[in-house]
Image (spheres, rainbow, N blue to C red):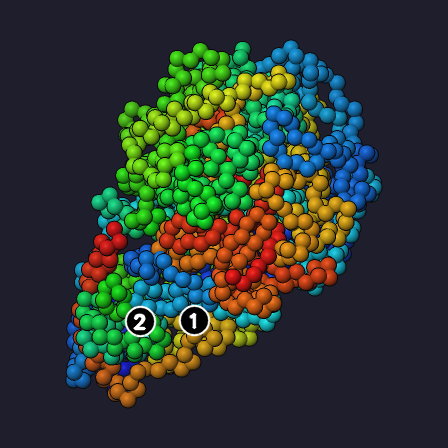
């Protein structure tokens, strides 16, 4: 669901196909019958954007099924490894009680300092919390912050511990998570699913039964999703809903199970881990923010540290990161330079930034290897670009973003004059993959190194070269400044020139290995002494490490684990641990303690992955000389658990971090060590997934008529002429449209539409529409059609097919159309910009736009 | 005379390549199987450089065959547990990312209001970009908010891109901007 | 002497990705039509339309639907059949078309005089002129790769192993097992096409697993040699000129690469 794996990740799809030949069942739930559907055992049509209703229906079906209630495996997994038994605060009110919203909903008004957050409302999540016993005694957090306690920061972390959560392992308490979720999804019946999703009931039941049959001790089921689950105003909740279902089915932390994100770019996992994203700093720490209690280093630690999980080590991650930023200048006395680190003012995400650019708040832009001129609400985006004082584009081709000022549709139509555009624009040519070395992190969190093969032509330079050489210039430009605001930059550690003996690939080229070494981390003052992993991190400044999660990828000066290319021999059920390196700590299946039962035994022989070996003789501790008791977690993978913590180990009463968790709590990044069916904190739009309609939808919300859409989703530039939105059931835009990728092209086309071999395979933009709609509109195959939304109007050729079509939704016949979004005006294969139709609305957790479900009109040109 | 395909092969195999076969010569046939004597394989003596496909996130391993500093072929690395040597059409086309007459190789500059590009020197352009970054940063820098919160940031610059580039790029990119106080750093993971 | 080698294409696991088309072009350095600037065909996702002198692999898309979402989408990667009794080889007047030691059929570009006889003779419409070379061209089953023990580029690239390469006898066994499996799963229309050494053209060294009549895939039900009245010796006579090596292929490829570079 939410992905078209055969088309968008064809080589990864090699493995589901192999599984299918071995008897696995392959199901594709999608608004289109795609190349994935073509080889699936079952294709189930679904109206774009209604996935939570479908998944919620599966949850309802599962918890009421005979199999789920009869097989003790499910109860054992759910009671012990999830928060099903946890009692929730008595003040909590569900959407079933409040007709579509949770308790805690407030209004939201934009702060004057940064009015680009877009939220329509805001939840106070206090009532979603666990019902807890009294907080353990000890010094108060506020006092520790006030007296600048630490390092070490253990007391500060300990002060954050909460009282014990109340539980009912019988799952009978009406306020326990299991009962709440059962009530929450009680109206998500197969009939309701059919009404909302347009998915035939009989097919929906076949999916539910297949999942039940293929989950349990001896069998697992996996979900694969991609951006068709993220690009919604409730995208995070869709994925969360799937995680909830998979936890109920015991399909998390086990081989052949899980919720697999099929990410879209070679390094997109890397660019999230090593965040060129506004909201986080390395290793998924939240970016210091003016909107949160992040006034000081200790305040940040108090706000961001989960004391009873591995995140209890956050002070170590943060201090080591600050050391990597500011080097020697970062000391305990100056809070490791925390004040120099910039704070965000609010939402500075992609759309928010373009909305601010349109208002003249963003004046300069550097764009490297991305093509926003064909991106969300293209007309508005290009309008924003024209407001810039300066723009730098670095790419391999003269992309739409590089040429929007003289080739954009507005310029072509005469609406915008080239001479009126006052932006100073630069284009820098880039290297291609074979022309430099470095690492990508793939969708499995695996870092893989690629090596230099040949030199790039002309002035092509690596993108790393660009920033390295800019940094040197900026250092020079600020060298003489004594202004306090410039001290942070002056102190930034910038040591990426190749070591003596290592020849730069291009004049002035930094050493990619050296950059990865800083990410991996080293002993402060001795960059040659690498950290072997994040277990060695300290909170006193004695370790320097940009990214705790990547620590271990380069454990010694000459040991680049990402460059390893040794696969397991054939026939071994291994995890290929000597191929590349996956974070964290080279683990391939996360939370894999859950692949064993409470006692540490594999749930079944067939699904063996990681288990407790009670006879394992542990070597003595090198420092104390004392050997721990016998026993260790072993298996095919690197165990995602304290290596020698026995299954019967109890939490230490005063413990923080992993010491606060027992031997049966596999979800070590969660405060209670459990998989969260109900999310008490961390999501801004509710603790449980709830069906809402997309912002633009042809139908009313059947489940919650009073709350058509998520009450807290984002609308940027609301009311602006360049971000007009269709109202519910708008007769001017009666069709549901979804956008997508094709196998033959890539993204906005910069890496495919310039390649003759790919261009000829899909040479033109098209709109896929059903035969019924085509007939209604007098459109024949290959006719030119005009597609319009409140934001724009584009032309494309019709591809009339039964692979997409009409669905019966809530008694209405809803036509679906679909368009691949790879095109623009540059390249060998050109076509209209499909994103000229999309809008600036998005998810409140992650600010991702709603590109997978909106409305349009279609007419013959 | 009936000669099955099997016989054909067997006979020629027995007699050796390029030799006329006794019994069949009478028919006026030369049953020599074709065989290239000096078939030159394009990748013979080429260096195979381990690489990774730059398209989607699957991380297929490739081998780049290089001869005389030129790429002669790119194909899947059969050792990889991800792709076992296979590739999709995009992966199979990586060669044309490199060897392509449409590749941009020059630095271009457009003055405000100008109707066209000018080709400029790389070093000049870098100096000019650095100058602009400094000016915008200095003009828009915020040390603290009216409520007294220290923020040391500028909202005036937006950096975009990274998901198609290396981890190492992402590190220096975010470090560069955060070091300068720029927070609007984004990439394709958002969209 | 190596045994007969060829392709078994299991169309039921083809995902229509066209990796085979591009991998073939990459290895053989074949140009795209009009430099890649073409128009969409409107025939499903098939935009290269047919096998010809610059498309030695071609993926067909067949939409079989009765109403929205109700049906199936068949895909098939097509290629030269490397017929055991090859019409092209039979009619070639210059001896440019040869049978290799792997029992595959290869056109030697430097011997080909561009007369087009083979184009007309092929019952599958596989061969056409390569305008860049001025000669008739088609799949060589990557003869140059096979010689050094490498599998053909398309089979190697195929992500789902829909295209399988190997000794024909092994492939036939494997193919029959797959047919049996499909039939057991209820796909009664599963059948092999071109696997029978006693069938048309003496069997095809590139054969297919189909789930419908061959015509549905654009394959002739009963492919025939262009000249059934020729006696058998004539067939071999045509092959008699085939002693020249395949150096021509190398030369041609080099020329094409130079053009591209």
Of A303 and A277, nearer the camera is: A277
Secondary structure beneath dot 2 equals loop
Q: Is residue A732 among the parts visible in the rendering?
A: yes
Measured from the top left, where is residue A33 in percent x and y? 56, 61
Crowding around mark 1 (Cα neighbors within 10 Å: few <14, some 14 to 19, many 20+) is many
Of A238 and A832, nearer the camera is: A832
- Chain letter of mark 1 equals C
Secondary structure beneath dot 1 equals strand
Measured from the top left, where is residue A343 in percent x and y? 56, 24
Q: Which residue is mark 1?
A: C208
Residue lying furthest bottom: C229
Crowding around mark 2 (Cα neighbors within 10 Å: few <14, some 14 to 19, many 20+) is many
**Looking at the image, residue A482 lies above or below residue A495:** above
Residue found at x 75% / y 56% = A192
Q: Is residue A87 among the parts visible in the rendering?
A: no
Of the numbered discs in the image, which one, if any, rests on residue A746? none
Q: Which residue is mark 2?
A: C127
Rounded to the nearest whole Å, what is the CA distance between mark 2 and mark 1? 19 Å
């Amino acid at each position: 669901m939410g992905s078209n794996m055969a088309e968008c990740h064809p080589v990864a799809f090699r493995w589901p196909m192999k599984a299918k030949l071995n008897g696995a069942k392959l199901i594709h739930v999608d608004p289109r019958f795609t190349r994935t559907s073509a080889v699936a055992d079952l294709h189930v049509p679904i109206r774009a954007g209604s996935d939570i209703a479908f998944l919620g229906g599966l949850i309802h079906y599962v918890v009421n099924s005979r199999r789920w209630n009869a097989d003790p495996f499910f109860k054992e997994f759910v009671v012990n490894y999830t928060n099903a038994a946890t009692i929730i605060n008595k003040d909590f009110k569900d959407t079933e009680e409040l007709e579509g919203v949770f308790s805690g909903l407030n209004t939201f008004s934009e702060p004057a300092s940064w009015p680009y957050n877009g939220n329509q409302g805001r939840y106070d999540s206090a009532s979603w919390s666990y019902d807890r016993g009294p907080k353990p005694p000890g010094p108060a957090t506020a006092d520790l912050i006030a007296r600048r306690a630490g390092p070490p920061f253990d007391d500060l972390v300990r002060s954050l511990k909460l009282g014990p959560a109340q539980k009912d392992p019988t799952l009978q308490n009406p306020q326990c998570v299991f009962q709440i979720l059962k009530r929450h999804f009680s109206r998500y019946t197969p009939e309701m699913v059919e009404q909302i999703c347009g998915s035939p009931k009989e097919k929906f039941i076949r999916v539910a039964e297949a999942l039940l049959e293929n989950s349990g001790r001896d069998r697992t089921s996996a979900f694969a999703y991609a951006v068709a689950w993220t690009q919604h105003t409730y995208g995070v909740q869709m994925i969360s809903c799937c995680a909830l279902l998979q936890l109920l089915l015991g399909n998390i932390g086990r081989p052949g199970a899980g919720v697999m994100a099929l990410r879209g770019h070679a390094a997109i996992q890397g660019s999230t881990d090593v965040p060129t994203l506004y909201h986080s700093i390395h290793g998924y720490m939240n970016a210091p923010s003016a909107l949160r209690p992040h006034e000081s280093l200790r305040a940040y630690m108090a706000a961001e540290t989960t004391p009873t999980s591995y995140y209890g080590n956050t002070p170590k991650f943060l201090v080591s990161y600050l050391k990597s930023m500011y080097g020697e200048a970062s000391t305990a006395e100056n809070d490791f330079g925390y004040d120099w680190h910039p704070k965000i003012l609010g939402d500075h995400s992609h759309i928010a930034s373009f909305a601010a650019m349109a208002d003249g708040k963003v004046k300069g832009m550097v764009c490297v290897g991305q093509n926003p001129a064909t991106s969300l609400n293209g007309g508005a985006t290009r309008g924003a670009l024209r407001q810039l004082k300066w723009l730098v584009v670095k790419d391999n081709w003269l992309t739409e973003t590089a040429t929007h000022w003289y080739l954009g549709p507005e310029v072509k139509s005469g609406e915008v004059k080239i001479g009126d555009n006052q932006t100073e624009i630069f284009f820098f040519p880039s290297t291609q993959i074979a022309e430099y070395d470095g690492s990508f992190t793939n969708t499995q969190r695996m870092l893989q190194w690629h090596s230099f093969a040949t030199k790039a032509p002309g002035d092509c330079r690596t993108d790393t070269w660009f920033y390295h050489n800019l940094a040197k210039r900026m250092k020079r430009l600020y060298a003489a400044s004594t202004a306090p605001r410039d001290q942070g930059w002056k102190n930034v550690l910038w040591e990426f020139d190749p070591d003596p003996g290592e020849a730069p690939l291009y004049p002035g080229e930094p050493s990619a290995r050296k950059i990865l070494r800083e990410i991996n981390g080293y002993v402060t003052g001795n960059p040659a002494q690498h950290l072997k992993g994040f277990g060695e991190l300290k909170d006193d400044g004695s370790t320097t490490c940009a990214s705790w999660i990547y620590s271990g990828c380069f454990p010694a000066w000459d040991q680049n684990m990402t460059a390893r290319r040794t696969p397991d021999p054939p026939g071994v059920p291994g995890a290929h641990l000597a191929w590349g390196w996956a974070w964290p700590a080279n683990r391939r299946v996360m939370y894999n303690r859950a692949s064993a039962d409470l006692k540490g035994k594999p749930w079944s022989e067939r699904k063996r992955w990681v288990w407790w070996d009670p006879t394992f003789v542990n070597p003595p501790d090198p420092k104390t000389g004392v050997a721990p008791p016998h026993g260790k977690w072993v298996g095919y993978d690197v165990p995602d658990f304290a290596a020698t913590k026995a299954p019967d180990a109890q939490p230490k009463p005063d413990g923080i971090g992993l010491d606060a968790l027992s031997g049966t709590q596999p979800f070590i990044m969660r405060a209670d060590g459990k998989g969260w069916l109900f999310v008490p904190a961390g999501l801004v739009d509710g603790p449980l997934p709830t069906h809402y309609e997309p912002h633009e939808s042809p139908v009313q919300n059947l489940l919650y008529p009073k709350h058509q859409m998520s009450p807290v989703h984002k609308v940027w530039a609301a009311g602006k002429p360049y971000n007009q939105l269709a109202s519910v059931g708008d007769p001017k835009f009666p069709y549901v449209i979804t956008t997508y990728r094709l196998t033959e092209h890539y993204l906005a086309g910069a890496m495919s539409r310039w390649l003759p071999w790919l261009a000829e395979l899909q040479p033109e933009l098209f709109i896929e529409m059903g035969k019924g709609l085509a007939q209604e509109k007098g459109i024949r195959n290959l006719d030119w059609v005009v597609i319009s939304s409140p934001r724009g109007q584009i032309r494309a050729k019709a591809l009339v097919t039964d692979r997409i079509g009409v669905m019966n939704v809530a008694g209405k016949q809803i036509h679906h159309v679909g368009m691949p979004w790879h095109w623009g005006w540059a390249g060998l294969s050109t076509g209209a910009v499909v994103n000229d139709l999309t809008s600036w609305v998005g998810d409140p957790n992650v600010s991702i736009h709603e590109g997978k479900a909106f409305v349009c009109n279609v007419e013959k040109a | 005379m009936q000669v099955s395909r099997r016989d054909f092969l067997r006979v020629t195999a027995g007699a050796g390549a390029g030799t006329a076969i006794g019994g069949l010569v009478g028919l006026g046939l030369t049953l020599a199987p074709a065989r290239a004597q000096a078939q030159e394989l394009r990748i013979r003596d080429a260096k195979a450089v381990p690489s990774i496909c730059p398209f989607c996130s699957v991380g297929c391993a490739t081998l780049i065959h290089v001869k005389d500093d030129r790429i002669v072929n790119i194909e899947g690395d059969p050792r990889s547990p991800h792709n076992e040597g296979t590739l999709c059409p995009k992966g199979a086309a990586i060669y044309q990312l490199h060897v392509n007459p449409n590749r941009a190789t020059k630095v271009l500059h457009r003055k405000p209001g100008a109707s066209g590009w000018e080709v400029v020197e790389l070093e000049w352009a870098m100096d000019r970009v650095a100058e602009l970054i400094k000016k915008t940063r200095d003009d828009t820098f915020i040390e603290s908010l009216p409520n007294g919160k220290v923020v040391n940031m500028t909202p005036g610059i937006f950096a975009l891109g990274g998901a198609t580039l290396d981890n190492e790029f992402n590190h220096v990119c975010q470090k560069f901007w955060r070091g300068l106080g720029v927070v609007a750093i984004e990439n394709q993971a958002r969209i | 002497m190596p045994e007969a080698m060829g392709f078994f294409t299991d169309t039921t696991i083809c995902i229509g990705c066209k990796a085979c088309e591009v991998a073939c072009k990459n290895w053989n350095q074949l140009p795209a039509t009009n430099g890649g600037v073409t128009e969409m065909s409107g025939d499903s996702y098939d935009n290269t339309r047919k096998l010809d002198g610059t498309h030695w692999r071609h993926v067909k898309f067949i939409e079989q639907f009765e109403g929205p979402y109700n049906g199936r989408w068949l895909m098939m990667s097509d290629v030269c059949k490397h017929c055991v009794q090859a019409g092209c080889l039979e009619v070639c007047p210059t001896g440019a078309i040869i049978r290799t030691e792997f029992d595959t059929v290869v056109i030697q570009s430097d011997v080909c005089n561009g007369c087009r006889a083979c184009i007309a003779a092929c019952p599958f419409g596989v061969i056409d002129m390569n305008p860049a070379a001025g000669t008739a061209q088609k799949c060589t089953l990557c003869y140059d790769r096979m010689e050094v023990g490498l599998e053909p580029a398309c089979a190697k690239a195929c992500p789902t192993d829909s295209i399988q390469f190997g000794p024909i006898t092994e492939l036939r066994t494997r193919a029959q097992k797959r047919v049996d499996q499909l039939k057991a799963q209820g796909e009664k229309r599963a059948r092999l096409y071109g696997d029978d050494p006693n069938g048309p053209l003496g069997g095809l060294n590139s054969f297919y697993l189909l789930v419908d009549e061959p015509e549905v895939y654009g394959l002739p039900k009963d492919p025939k040699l262009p000249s059934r009245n020729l006696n058998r010796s004539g067939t071999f006579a045509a092959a008699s000129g085939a002693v020249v090596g395949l150096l021509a292929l190398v030369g041609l490829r080099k020329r094409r690469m130079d053009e591209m570079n």
